[in-house]
Amino acid sequence: MTNERASRNPSDRPPTAAAGSTTDSRITLRSPAELADALPYMLGFHPTDSLVMVAVHGEGGRFGGRLRVGIPATPAEWEDTARQVADCLIRGSERRGIKPDGIVVFLCQEPLDGESGQRVMTRLRPLAQRIRLACGALDVPVLEALCLSAGRFWSYVCPDQRCCPAEGSPLAAVGTSVMAAAATFAGLQVRGSLKEIEGRLAPLGGPVAAEMERALDRAAAALVPKILDGATRQEVGAETLALARALMRRITLAPPVEGAHADDRDDALLGHDEAAALILGLQDREIRDIAAEWMEDEEAGPALRLWRALARRCVGAYGEHAAAPLTLAGWVSWSTGDEPTARITLGLALRADADYRFAQLLHHACNEGIDPEGLRQCLREERRGREPRRGRRPAGGRPPGRRGRPAPSRDSRRTAGSGQ
């Protein structure tokens, strides 16, 4: 990319290369249109209501670190947000020894009631300007700033009406562009929109939510007399894990359902009282850590579906309890190679409980590109040590996952108190 956006011919601009799934895969982007089309492939999902920043390195414009946050609803917050995101991306890159040579900014927001896409672009222009100033204050220029709304895009930087007209330019239809073909060849996937991914993990509503909250109340009330009657923590933990395994078997044996109804089917497979007992049991740190061992091979799929279903059952006054199943869901997603979904899910876990230490560590490690294999190996060893006579299968081949620095050790996760 170049910072000279007044180029007479868009094709004269130096290309920006986006790395694909292997070190040999490169996708060259030469215009704002191609940048806009590339965004969901860079993130792994279509961002909604999002501010996205991507670091650019070197003369060839290689993409580096990226950052996504929600767009603050109140313009009064834009100044602080701009400073924080600029500092986070640039200082974070500097700590890794690779200060960016430039930044590409995307502002993605659908129109509110009665708005047009062009109106969204105009309304968000001051935010784009604040981000440009904040990055400039750290000696890193914003090479391009795009607004994506209502199926069109606008450039806040390019003055050339031929490539960036005032009425905006249409985005390419999903899956029809050269970028889509190249990304598919390179192994890059788009897993729906941010809204869709978050929607799969949102608490249930309506009468079902009221029934679920009553079940959670019953389970919480039943837990106290169990302890007073002498039931040990280990016994409660064994009951919780046995129930989780039984529900995973139930999920595995159920006839498959594809598409939008898959989550509904999983919800129907769980009774309210079963879900409530399991949600409360997973609040114990050691039980949650054992459940985290179901992260690969034939256990990963049903475990992920169970954790998602439990997160949806954390309703009403029990919203904070969702941190445990959401963290487990994020961990399984990361362990099996779905980093974009893992980041979103772990972010939701921290939204449920900002102090949940396990989620904090996993979210940081995933964002830093750390290899999850270190933590997988640690969990395998814990499992073998705890069940030496059960003839556990060897670890086998390495599951898919991004290669990088070792994941945080199990001991580092235990620096926090019980339940974290």
Image: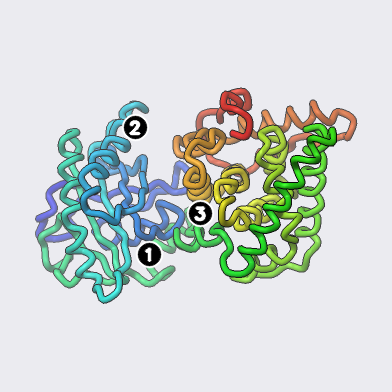
- Residue 69: where, in percent of width, then height? 36, 49
Which label number is shown at residue 178?
1
**Marks 3, 2: nearer the viewer:** 2
**Mark 1, other Cα within 10 Å: few <14 / some 14–19 / many ≥20:** some
The amino acid on which the numbered mark 2 sits, given as a three-letter code, is Gly
Determine whether 253 is above or below 307 in the image. Answer: below
The residue singled out by tag 2 in the image is 92
In terms of secondary structure, where does tag 3 sit?
loop
**Mark 3, other Cα within 10 Å: few <14 / some 14–19 / many ≥20:** few
Determine contact: label 3, label 2, CB under 8 Å. Answer: no
In the rendered structure, the answer to whether residue 95 lies left or right of residue 183 reads left
Which one is in front, 252 or 101?
A: 252
The amino acid on which the numbered mark 1 sits, given as a three-letter code, is Val
- Quadrant containing the C terminus is top right
Determine whether 176 is above or below 408 in the image. Answer: below
Q: Is residue 228 visible?
A: yes
The tag earlier along the polypeptide, 3 or 2, is 2
Picture quadrant of residue 92 = top left
The residue singled out by tag 3 in the image is 187
